[in-house]
Amino acid sequence: MINLIKDELFSFEGANYRIKRVLSDRIHVVGEHLETRETRTIKNTLMGKPIIPDLEELYPEIPADLLTEAEEELAKWRLEIILPFVDKYADPEKLKKRAKEYGVGVSTIYKWRARYQKTRHLSALIDREGRGGKGKSKLSKEQDEIIDQAIAAVYYKKKSVAKTYLEVEILCKSAGVDVPNIKSVKKRISAKGEATAVKFRRSRQKSEELFQGHAGKIPDAKHPFSMVQIDHTKLDIILVDPIYRKPLGRPWLTLLIDVYSRCPAGYYLSLDPPGNFGTGQAVAHSMYPKHDWLSKYKVDGEWPCWGAMTTIHADNAGEFDSDMLKSACLAYGIGLQWRPKTKPRYGAHIERMMGTFNEEIHSLPGTTFSNIKDRQYFEYDSKRMAAFTLDEFEQWILTYITQVYMIRNHTGIGMTPLAKLKKGLLGEDGMPASGLNEFYENFDRLRLDFMPSYERTIQSSGVQAENMEYYSPVLSPYINLKEEYEFEKKRQKKKFIFKMDLRNIKKIYFLDPGTRIYHEIPSVDLSCPDISIWEKREVERELKKKNATIDTHAIVRGYVALRELERAAVEKTQQARRRESRKSELETKPMPKAQTIDDYPAPPEVTAESTTIKKAPKRFKNIDHGSFR
């Protein structure tokens, strides 16, 4: 039997319909197609068999503590009405009498009884909101599509609700559809959620970061250097050249942090974008002692971080997944671990430190702030106010690390990073002392191990790399040496490992396979000056323009000619000053001399006084720009 009441389901001409309205003649109904939402007048005698909905799906159980007091009272009242007919035959006469007594329709009691018999829970007696259940739209299909279209085209493009509703009005009038109320548009935006808006307005990663649960996280380190994190950032400051004090550009910083103590472990600062070379040098810097480095820059501070870490935790950038870094870490027993893609929260420690560094830099002359709006707000000309050279800024970084950051209280660990580091080295709270890490005396070897490598055969004329030729008598035993294949007639020439310092390719380094020692191999052109890989490639571009032969002698001649032009133009162009600064960087950064472990005093004992939080120096505010010379 089909009850001629609103929302009853039935079939007609092979499709499913819902009774939207019963006409006054009680013979015809207005039926709505469940999928297309089209409406049509249908005679009751043509209506097919009723559709019995899955009541358990339509009326899922709602826990009692989630029902409002009004809902609970209403459900109990309805249960009281149907209770005499739940588990036995419903006599029509008694049911009519019950309906009249409580002032409800007979068909309504049948509906409540069916729901409760199928589900056996109280919440089934509560009506769902709107037509077709809670959360379903009461608008027509055309109105729904237009609202969704306007939200995607206007609201998600960072436009206001008012402009979105204006778009809805235009689209509805063009399509001949009734314009919905603005409340319907606001409700639809709210139903889609702020997470969806952030996804379209900013990025999916930002939406996940703000609105999704963060079940996974990187485990905390158990002792110093058990895990370090590494990352790059372009610092918010413009540096100047050391000769004319004119702008060079913003430097790149590759930084490592010890997760256990939150101490910076090492870094690499350069005007060139990050790559395999800078990454390797930052790791190497974190592994050797900082005493000579601090002395070179005349910084009086304590930075007791050195030795191989257990694990390096990095993002998925190419330089962190390079063969060079994998091979070097394998040789020193260092594990590499990559955080999940597009999940910045897994690198929270290094990200937070990078942010702290940039925040401090915003008080220095030449800062670019975080964005252009800040510069406009403060009416600050970053280039005109720039004052630090690369060396002077590196001195500032070392001073900030040792005299501010490491002795300032860190809320994440409840003490200063330096105090936490010393406690880890000497033991704390029942945890055994980890002790000092292995001390590497051969710093040159350490530096070379973390440089990019390549394989080359050795000819009678020497070795060719980057269109330059290199030779030394140490290569003689390996000239034209072939692979040892027992059954091959045409054996291939054997390849050997070479390393190159990209800041000075006047010489390369040969790894002797017998002694496992690196040997310097100079350029065959003794007149070759100190030249970086970037300068060499620029010379090659100029030679290609002239269709000239590219070899060692041509590169040297071209480089000398370019240097003369650069010296004349260095005061005028920022690019020339950057190249000049690279030269001074190379000349002013010798590797620290090899020392023994006896040259370094044992760390002091951790006492109440040594762990007391020292008052951090004041930040660099109200600084006199003219004092930087």
Image (cartoon, rainbow, N blue to C red):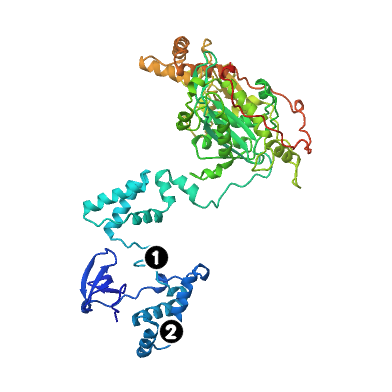
Image location of residue 492, percent across then percent down: 48, 29
Q: Nearer the viewer, residue 266 or 96?
A: 96
Residue in view at x 37 percent, y 54 percent: 186
Looking at the rendered image, the quarter that the N terminus falls into is: bottom left
Apparent side of residue 481 relative to residue 590 in the rendered image (left or right): left
Alpha carbon distance from label 1 to label 2: 26 Å
Number of the label disc, if any, that sits on residue 86: 2
Seen at 78% across and 39% down, the residue is 608
In the image, what residue type sits under mark 2? Val
Residue in the picture at 47% in, 49% down: 208
* Rendered view: 539 above or below 127: above
Residues at circles 1 and 2 in contact by the CB criterion of under 8 Å: no
Which amino acid lies under the numbered mark 1 shown in the image of this protein? Lys
Which x, y percent locates residue 195? 44, 50
Image point 63% across, 22% down: which residue?
591
Q: Quadrant of the C terminus?
A: top right
Tell which of 433 and 75 is nearer to you: 75
Looking at this view, is 558 or 177 the one in front? 177
Crowd tier of the residue under label 1, counting other residues whose Cα lies within 10 Å: few below 14, some 14–19, many 20 or above = few
| Horizontal and vertical percent position of residue 199 | 42, 47
Looking at the image, residue 388 lies above or below residue 229: above
Identify the secondary structure beneath mark 1. Answer: loop
Neighbourhood count class around disc 2 (C-alpha, 10 Å): few under 14, some 14–19, many 20 upward? some
The quarter of the picture where residue 418 lies is top right
Q: Position of residue 601 (x, y in %)?
A: 77, 29
In the rendered image, the vertical position of residue 150 relative to residue 98, given as above or below: above
Q: Please, what secondary structure does the residue beneath circle 2 have?
A: loop
Instruction: Identify the residue position indicated by label 1 in the image.
Output: 134
Q: Which mark is residue 210?
A: none
Sequence order check, earlier mark of 1 and 2: 2
Kindly indicate the quadrant of the structure image that contains residue 512.
top right
